[in-house]
Amino acid sequence: MPDTVERFLLMASYEKGHEFIRQCAEMGVRCTLLTLDKLRDADWPRDALEDIATMPPGLSREQILNTVSWMVRGRRFDRIVALDEFDVGTAAQIREHLRIPGMGVTTAGYYRDKLAMRTAAQRAEFLVPQFCPVLNYDELRDFMDRIAPPWLLKPRTEASAVGIRRIEEPEQLWRALDELGDRQSHFVLEQFVPGDIFHVDAIISERKVVFSAVHRYGRPPMQLMHEGGVFTTRTVDRASRDWSELTALNAELAPSFGMVRGVTHAEYIRAHADGRYYFLEIAARVGGAFIADLVETATGVNLWQEWARIEIADLRGATYAVPQPAENYAGSVLCLAQTAEPDTSAFDAPEIVLRMKKLHHAGLIVRSASSRRIEELLDQYSSEFAARFLATLPPLERLTPA
């Protein structure tokens, strides 16, 4: 007799997505988690999982495909969901091989590969910083002749600012490419555009953005990755130009690469030189660094839970409806800490709603009806966090593409 139980296979290279897993369980969908051996004993919501399967690190996509193909001999999966960005491409390949509905390899590339997303955005006439694939050396020479330095050498498939190098002159680029060898085609060279960086976190349903929230980083993530410091981000004033223009821009851009349903985390820069908004990158995932908690604090919308609801609605042929969002303002302050469990009890503002619990991290999320109050608190707390807690580590280069 055919198996009629609704099941999802979840893939995660890092521990995350607990709310997604619990939402699935609450709605009657059984989830199997495929993760790494080192995460076997992590604090997963085991009561909400049907099974956990693990595998060693460093497997090729073909080996992971073989693993999943073996798993489906005894258990049918209706959907495959990549909870982490590093699993997006692999999940897409497995979907295509097993003919399971969802994002395929080509579409996944637009939300994973920085060269693919830039090329697509440029062709659709969105503003992007000038860029050049690291493929043809004559094209690279022409780019460096036309575009004044500095430039950024970016891995095409890394997350966030990991592995980005600032290049000041052509000889520095050629040395870096010599070091990369055969791996250099996995990079893109891009114009450095000074400006203020924003992230827009969105829900897409049937190719339309049905929810989004705009936040502005304090210091740019790339600067924090290379120099260290305190990470902050806060909700943009809803009456501002930043909110209205970035909301409209993201509503057009986020689904334009092919996503039918899911969540996106996109970054844009408002250039100091001309005040215009440039597209930087987009991912088919929930933002990291407690951004999901930040969005929920500001709007009441939990991105992980809504992502699960969208997938289940599609599976059941139902219509998805996003909850009515609240209109509070929220901000987060976060840094690496010198101690394993830093004590943040000295920070006692009534606006504090969450104290982050993560080893060797100090973090708070605050909420207010006033965007100005959030800005004041983050300015105060970021300097105090730097004095009390801040630890620094060498920047993570990770030049080998994931």
Image (cartoon, rainbow, N blue to C red):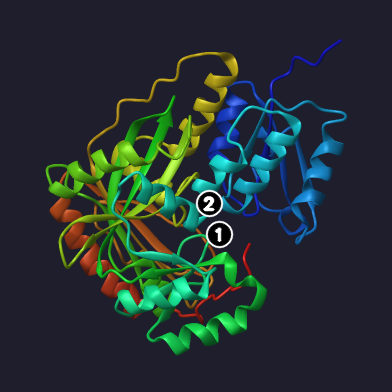
Q: Quadrant of residue 348?
A: bottom left
Q: Residue furthest top?
A: 1
Q: In the shown orientation, is residue 261 left or right of residue 249?
A: right
Camera-nearest residue between 137 and 269: 137
Q: Residue at x 46, y 89 (%)?
A: 171
Q: In the shown orientation, is residue 25 left or right of residue 214?
A: right
Give the image location of residue 104, x and y in percent: 61, 37
Report the quarter where the N terminus lies. top right
Q: Residue at x 54, y 83 (%)?
A: 176
Give the image location of residue 186, x and y in percent: 58, 65
Q: Is residue 157 above or below residue 149?
A: above
Give the image location of residue 88, x and y in percent: 60, 46
Q: Is residue 32 visible?
A: no
Q: Residue at x 62, y 54 (%)?
A: 14
Amino acid type indicated by mark 2? Arg
Quickly name the residue at label 1: 157
- Give the CA separation, mark 1 to mark 2: 6 Å
Q: Pointer 1: residues within 10 angstroms few (<14), some, or many (20+)?
A: many
| Labels 1 & 2 near each other (Cβ < 8 A) | yes
Secondary structure state at the residue bearing disc 1:
loop
Amino acid type indicated by mark 1? Thr
Q: Is residue 280 visible?
A: yes
Q: Residue at x 51, y 82 (%)?
A: 394
Q: Is residue 301 above or below residue 2?
A: below
Q: Quadrant of residue 244?
A: top left
Residue 112 is marked as 2
Secondary structure state at the residue bearing disc 2:
loop
Report the quarter where the C terminus lies. bottom right
Camera-nearest residue between 255 and 115: 115
